[in-house]
Image (cartoon, helix red, strand yellow):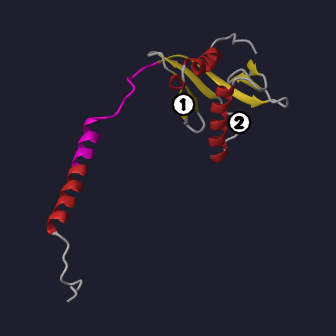
Amino acid sequence: MAQTTQDRRFPKGALYGAGALIGLSLLITGFARVSGLGTSQTPDANIVQSRELRFEDRPDGGVSIYEGRTDRIVDVLVPGTNGFVRGVMRAFARERRREDVGPQPPFLLARWSDGRLSIEDVATHEHIELEAFGQTNFAAFARLLNDRSASR
């Protein structure tokens, strides 16, 4: 004799177990959120050096870097060099196109009191912490804080 589907019931123990698991997950997540457990936080720091920079593509494939306030040329990245700087700036340019922002607003390159270096697009508020990409890539931007940048 075949058993009908009405005779088969879902086990109550499994339902209670699933409910307890969901409740425990929500409780642990809430506790972690409130207490900050499992998160990393950057300590408060102040900007100790900064510079507004504007980047402009050149017809020869290079990139001219201008000081944001004076439009004085800071550096020229010759074609085929400075791949990390170019990559970061392409990411910012992509976000600017998405938000219909032109190339005119400068970027803020900042050194912080705790040694970090960051660049922020003041127009879109996108922000990149540069030390996360290693010392060589960090140095590629750090040199732009100085009045005289590295060789072209």
Residue range (magenta): 27-46
Q: Is residue 29 magenta?
A: yes
Which residue: 63% across, 37% down? Answer: 91
- Residue 93 quadrant: top right
- In which quadrant is the C terminus drawn? top right
Check residue 128 in the rendering and tell me which mark sits there, or answer none. Answer: 1
Residue at image point 19% right, 65% down: 15
- Element type where label 1 sits in the image: strand
Q: Position of residue 87 (x, y in %)?
A: 65, 32
Q: Position of residue 48 (x, y in %)?
A: 50, 15
In this view, the residue farthest toward the right is 60
* Residue 45 falls left or right of residue 133: left
SS category of the residue bearing label 2: loop
Q: Which residue is depicted at the point 58% across and 39% down?
A: 124
Per the rendering, the mark at residue 109 is none
Residue behind mark 2: 103
Three-letter code, disc 1: Ile
Q: Residue at x 67, y 11 (%)?
A: 147
Q: Is 59 left or right of 20, judged from the image as shown? A: right
Residue occupying the far top of the picture: 148
Q: Please tell me how crowded label 2 is: few (under 14), some (14-19), or many (20+) other residues with Cα within 10 Å.
A: some
Q: Quadrant of residue 53?
A: top right
| Residue 5 on the magenta segment | no
Q: Is residue 15 or residue 129 the one in the foreground?
A: 15
Residue 37, by quadrant, is: top left
Q: Is residue 31 above or below residue 113?
A: below
Q: Tell me which amino acid carries mark 2.
A: Pro
Nearest the eye: 62 or 73: 62
Q: Of the residues tagged 2 and 1, which is closer to the observer?
A: 1
